[in-house]
Image: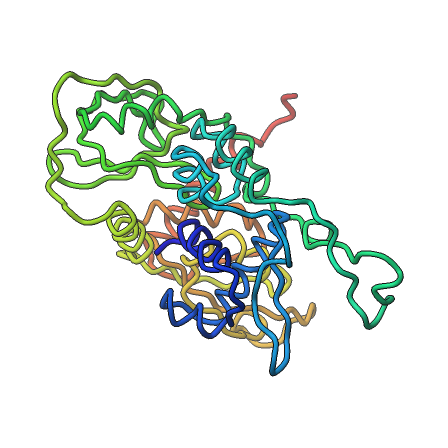
Amino acid sequence: MERPQRLLAILTVLQSGRRTTAADLAGQFAVSKRTILRDIDALAEADVPVVAERGRYGGISLVYAADVDVARLSDRETEALGLVGLDVARARELGLEAHTRSAARKLSTRAPWPGTPGTGGTAADGPSPGLSDLVAIDTAGWFDAERAIEAGSLLDALRRGHRLSLWYRTSGRTDAERLIVDPHGLYSRGGRWYLIAEVDARPRMFALTRLESWRELDESKEVRSSAPLAEVAANLVSALEQRRDVVVTALLDTATEDLARRILGSRLLSVEPFDAYGRGADDSGRQGLKITVGYDEVDGVRQLIQFADHIEILDPPEARALVRGLSEDLAARHGDDRP
């Protein structure tokens, strides 16, 4: 069960009026206690009147007399809540914002929260702040300037179960190609939306930001894989992240390690100390790191150019040759005083 569906199921359990525990819920939904507690925090952050009390006689329950009734949700509200939880940004991209907001209103009583004794005051000092007053969560990526995605009409087409004709621009190309695909569904990862669809009976992942146009065809889709959408997407992601046909070894300035980890992510296979780039102590006393980075092809080493004079490629020889050629070309372009 995915998290949005689990949140709705937890609410249904709590609505029965009985107090339960994180351990009981964890056993019921086959997840860890830590996961259940994060789910409870997410509900509280959305102003759902759920409380968790510690101690021998503690437990998880709804605030006494709270007017929360999952049965009041419409079919579309329940569907939206089960798909994206209370993530309004994701709902907006799918054309489900109104249903998500109305579901959130029905689940939130906006009742004052009881004061929390301890550091900072007692119940007599007034209600303590809710999690939404203390925690802000933004699922967008850093420096994300990509165009806004409106996938509502595409989602409607997917519901009808037809093939699609795409004009899609592959990464690194300037022109789009036409493809006939059998769609599985939409997938969100890292703040971006993707269409998972089969081309010639093989699943592929299409970034919606590079989908220039699409058209619904008057023929039913024929997908070969009967696996759930989440499983198909997970297999595609795993294959992409584990493809390391070329392993590049390089020397990197120690001060650049944090930046390298952020930029390279799972491509960064190993990091180990390496004094003065392996050439003994020099006058600067520079300390370095020996790193290995995995790519699916040697051309991926272009990514490392952004580290400029903080990096030196050691192996393989063709990667060194590529960086040398790129550096010479850059030097030639910047070799005069043209504005």
Q: What is the quadrant of the N terminus in the image?
A: bottom left
Q: Give coordinates of residue 195: x percent, y percent.
A: 31, 34
- Give the residue at x 18% y 25%: 163
Q: What is the quadrant of the C terminus in the image?
A: top right
In this rendering, position of residue 136 left or right of residue 149: right
Q: Which is more toward the observer, 108 or 257?
A: 108
Please state the total of marks drawn on the protein image: 0
Q: Which is more toward the observer, 26 or 232?
A: 26
Q: Give coordinates of residue 233: x percent, y percent.
A: 29, 47
Say which quarter of the image contains residue 243.
Answer: bottom left
Q: Which is more toward the observer, 264 or 213?
A: 213
Q: Which is more toward the observer, 80 or 193?
A: 80
Most distant residue in the bottom direction: 56
Q: Is residue 14 above or below residue 286?
A: above
- Give the residue at x 43% y 47%: 323
- Give the residue at x 42% y 54%: 9
In this rendering, position of residue 227 left or right of residue 144: left
Q: Give coordinates of residue 259: x percent, y percent.
A: 58, 55
In this rendering, position of residue 26 left or right of residue 244: right
In this rendering, position of residue 306 left or right of residue 202: right
